[in-house]
Image (cartoon, rainbow, N blue to C red):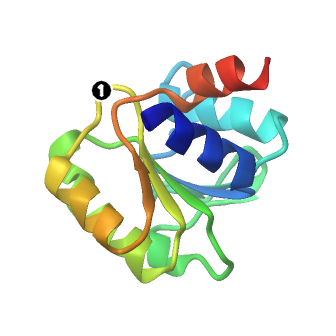
């Protein structure tokens, strides 16, 4: 089930909003979206402390995005996830992906109830490499 959901997201998503995008190349919040951009995904960095990332204009919150978003990729501590899931639902995202080590069952259930596909505790870079082979 989880693999099917991941494959569906990776196949269908075009625009990915990255919550917790980092300007530090050694952090997963930077190198995972950098990899995804190389694979042809459009990346929108979401970080109130950055003006840009990977050549894209950064936005402070998901609500500041002015185009459709397919996936909200979350790099935040698990306890900080719920408001980002709420925003993902509000902006009409199709899916939420919580990076490796990040999970929030109540927020995930809320997203699923709202019709979003949800992945928790999985690295999108690792899963994409496996899927793309």
Question: Label 1's element?
Answer: loop
Q: Give the side of residue 108 with respect to residue 131, left or right.
A: left
Say above or below: 10 vs 99.
Answer: below
Residue ID for mark 1: 101
Say above or below: 105 vs 128.
Answer: below
Q: Which residue is most to the front?
A: 1
List x then y, in percent, for residue 103. Answer: 25, 39
Which image quarter is the C terminus in? top right
Frontmost residue, 122 versus 24 = 122
Q: Residue at x 77, y 48 (%)?
A: 41
Say above or below: 118 vs 60.
Answer: above
Which image quarter is the N terminus in? top left
Frontmost residue, 27 versus 52 = 27
Q: Residue at x 82, y 35 (%)?
A: 39
Say above or below: 53 vs 123.
Answer: below
Q: Residue at x 51, y 78 (%)?
A: 92
List x then y, in percent, for residue 68. Answer: 66, 76
List x then y, in percent, for residue 116. Answer: 44, 65
Q: Mark 1 packing: few (<14 Cα in 10 Å), some, or many (20+)?
A: few
- Residue 80, can we see it? yes
List x then y, in percent, for residue 40. Answer: 84, 43
Frontmost residue, 120 versus 81 = 120
Frontmost residue, 114 versus 86 = 114
Q: How many marks?
A: 1
């Amino acid at each position: 089930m989880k693999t099917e959901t991941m494959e569906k997201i990776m196949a269908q998503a075009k625009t990915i909003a990255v919550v917790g995008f980092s300007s530090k190349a050694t952090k997963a919040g930077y190198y995972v979206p950098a990899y995804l951009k190389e694979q042809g995904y459009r990346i929108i960095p979401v970080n109130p402390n950055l003006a840009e990332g990977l050549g894209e204009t950064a936005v402070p919150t998901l609500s500041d995005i002015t185009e459709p978003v397919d996936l909200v990729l979350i790099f935040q501590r698990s306890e900080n996830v719920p408001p980002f899931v709420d925003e993902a639902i509000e902006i009409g995202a199709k899916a939420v992906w919580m990076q490796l080590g990040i999970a929030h069952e109540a927020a995930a259930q809320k997203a699923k109830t709202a019709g979003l596909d949800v992945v928790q505790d999985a690295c999108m870079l690792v899963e994409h490499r496996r899927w793309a082979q």
